[in-house]
């Protein structure tokens, strides 16, 4: 493993610039290009898949949209609570939430933000046939505008964690979107610090500063987000002066920025939890003994040490240690190959079994290398896993993860609160990603979502974690450090949620 890693590092160092030149049509410029108040270029591992802001449910795309269209609330990861963006205040009244909107906010088309825009946006997220976010609103009975700046949300049952539901749910201008009804692809009209200017599928997204922004005026006039899928290509492009910031920097490249005159590294522990998902409606993952055998066969410490060079944090249970609902008493399944083989025999597979392991190399850092290690570890107990690589837009679409079509896959999911993951991945009938069904689990989620007392709710979250660690329709792996590289003349600190919010960047 170590020899391969060193060989790959040397290869990237000597061939990276040439590789990026090929990607960019050979147009390498001098090392004089740097971020300025006029323009910043980001080399991103992921771009927009569509101009429909609700037809996705992935964290980095939320980060792209957040620059142009804003949510009602956002998470403070240090304090582990929420603060208002377009919402000024909120009040929980059992089956109702009353949300007061910030005043004197205007959309990019100059129309004022009103409660009608919030009603329009939530109803579109809930009812649009292309929406992949509708599950967040499945128990909404009614969303009404009480007045221009008051929204009342009525739910079937009390929903304590409404703010968690509203995070990353972006508000569009009703008039601005309806005015484009005769166009094949609607351009987003939001309230964000940057305005949409242009977009090319698998190409550049260009945003320009919103000089009428309600908050602090952004420092940089124009943002160009250029999609470069290959890790080595993004790093080489940054070093060659083709960009000013990039995400998903490979760990073996970190040393290249230590004394670089123009580029520095930024690193923060992420909130994305990586795991192997097992859809229990597909054989053999409908068998609990098979799922437990996989947990006994996997040792993520090897992955962290040899692939991520120590830049990772073991998950002992369903939640990472920085998530509300983490239970320090839960321990992961220990590595025990004999136990795994014994469970497979009891499950009816004395000679092992064959399966496919799906992953997305353009979405999760070093996903291919990770899945190769996992396949090697599974092979030691008789499970032959064929690796299937898919572009993220396919991997995450309705014919794959979000359609419940993939039996076994490697995935990452960020969360500030355990409820988000428990509700979306493991509660019956919410999404088809794993299709786990457990009446006791569902009942506890219902109870947890109605429990106002934080200590009592935390105790229920711990119960939920223990149930999952027994049934294990997944195999927990790790959280990772989020690693970026950025021009030294850009004042910016990385966020744990993978969002690149360009209004936070200041030019020195």
Image (cartoon, grey):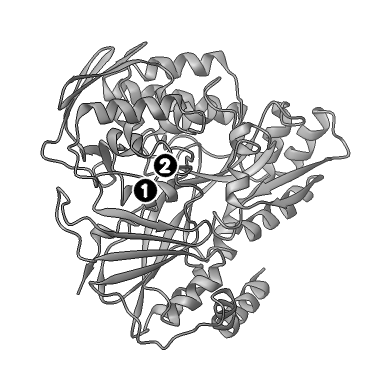
Q: Is the Cβ of the residue at disc 1 closer than 8 Å to that at disc 2?
A: yes
Q: Residue at x 45, y 82 (%)?
A: 240
As measured in the structure, the alpha-carbon distance from the residue carrying label 1 to the one carrying label 2 is 7 Å
Is residue 338 found left or right of 23 in the rendered image? Answer: right
Residue at the front extreme, as displayed:
182
Q: Residues within 10 Å of mark 2 (few under 14, many from 20)?
A: many
142 displayed left or right of 247:
left
The residue positioned 30% from the left and 33% from the top of the image is 174
Instruction: Report the front residue among 445 and 494.
Output: 494
Q: How many marks?
A: 2
Q: Quadrant of residue 398?
A: top right
- Which label's residue is closer to the chain start, 1 or 2? 2
**Label for residue 4?**
none
Side of 166 where 504 appears, left or right: left
- Determine which residue is flagged by label 2: 53
Q: Is residue 76 above or below residue 125?
A: below
230 is higher (above) or lower (below) than 416: below
Residue nearest the observer in this picture, 361 or 280: 361
């Amino acid at each position: 493993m170590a020899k391969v890693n060193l060989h790959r590092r040397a290869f990237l160092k000597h061939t990276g610039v040439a590789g990026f030149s090929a990607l960019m049509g050979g147009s390498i410029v001098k090392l004089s290009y740097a971020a300025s108040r006029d323009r910043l270029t980001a080399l991103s591992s992921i771009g927009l898949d569509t101009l429909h802001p609700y037809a996705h449910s992935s964290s980095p795309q939320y980060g792209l949209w957040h620059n142009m269209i804003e949510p009602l609330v956002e998470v403070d990861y240090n304090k582990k609570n929420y603060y208002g963006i377009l919402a000024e205040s909120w009040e929980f009244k059992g089956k109702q939430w009353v949300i007061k909107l910030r005043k004197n906010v205007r959309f990019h088309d100059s129309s004022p933000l009103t409660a009608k825009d919030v009603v329009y946006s939530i109803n579109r997220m809930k009812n649009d046939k292309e929406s992949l976010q509708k599950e967040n609103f499945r128990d909404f009975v009614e969303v009404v505008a009480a007045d221009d700046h008051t929204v009342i949300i009525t739910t079937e049952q009390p929903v304590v964690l409404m703010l968690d539901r509203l995070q990353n749910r972006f508000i569009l201008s009703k008039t601005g979107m309806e005015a484009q009804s005769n166009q094949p692809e609607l351009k987003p009209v939001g309230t964000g610090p940057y305005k949409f200017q242009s977009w090319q599928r698998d190409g550049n997204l260009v945003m320009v500063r919103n000089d009428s922004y309600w908050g602090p005026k952004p420092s940089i006039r124009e943002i160009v987000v250029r999609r470069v899928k290959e890790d080595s290509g993004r790093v080489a492009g940054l070093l060659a002066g083709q960009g000013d910031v990039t995400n998903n920097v490979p760990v073996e490249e970190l040393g290249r920025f230590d004394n670089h005159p123009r580029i520095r590294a930024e690193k923060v522990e992420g909130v994305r939890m990586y795991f192997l998902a097992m859809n229990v409606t597909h054989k053999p993952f409908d068998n609990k003994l098979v799922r437990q055998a996989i947990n006994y066969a996997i040792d993520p410490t090897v992955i962290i040490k040899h692939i991520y060079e120590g830049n990772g944090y073991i998950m002992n249970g369903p939640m990472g240690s920085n998530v509300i609902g983490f239970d320090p008493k839960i321990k992961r399944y220990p590595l025990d190959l004999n136990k795994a083989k014994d469970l497979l025999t009891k499950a009816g597979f004395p000679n092992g079994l064959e399966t496919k392991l799906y992953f997305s190399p353009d979405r999760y850092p070093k996903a291919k290398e990770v899945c190769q290690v996992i396949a090697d570890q599974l092979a030691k107990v008789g499970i032959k896993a064929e690796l299937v690589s898919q572009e993220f837009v396919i991997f995450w679409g309705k014919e794959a993860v979000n359609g419940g079509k993939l039996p076994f896959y490697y995935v990452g999911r960020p969360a500030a609160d355990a409820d988000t993951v428990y509700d979306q991945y493991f509660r019956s009938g919410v999404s088809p990603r794993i299709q786990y069904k457990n009446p006791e689990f569902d009942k506890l989620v219902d109870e947890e979502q109605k429990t106002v007392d934080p200590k009592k709710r935390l105790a229920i979250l711990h119960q939920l974690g223990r149930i999952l660690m027994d049934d294990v329709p997944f195999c927990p792996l790790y959280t990772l450090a989020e690693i970026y590289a950025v021009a030294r003349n850009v004042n910016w600190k990385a966020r744990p949620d993978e969002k690149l919010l360009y209004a936070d960047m200041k030019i020195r």
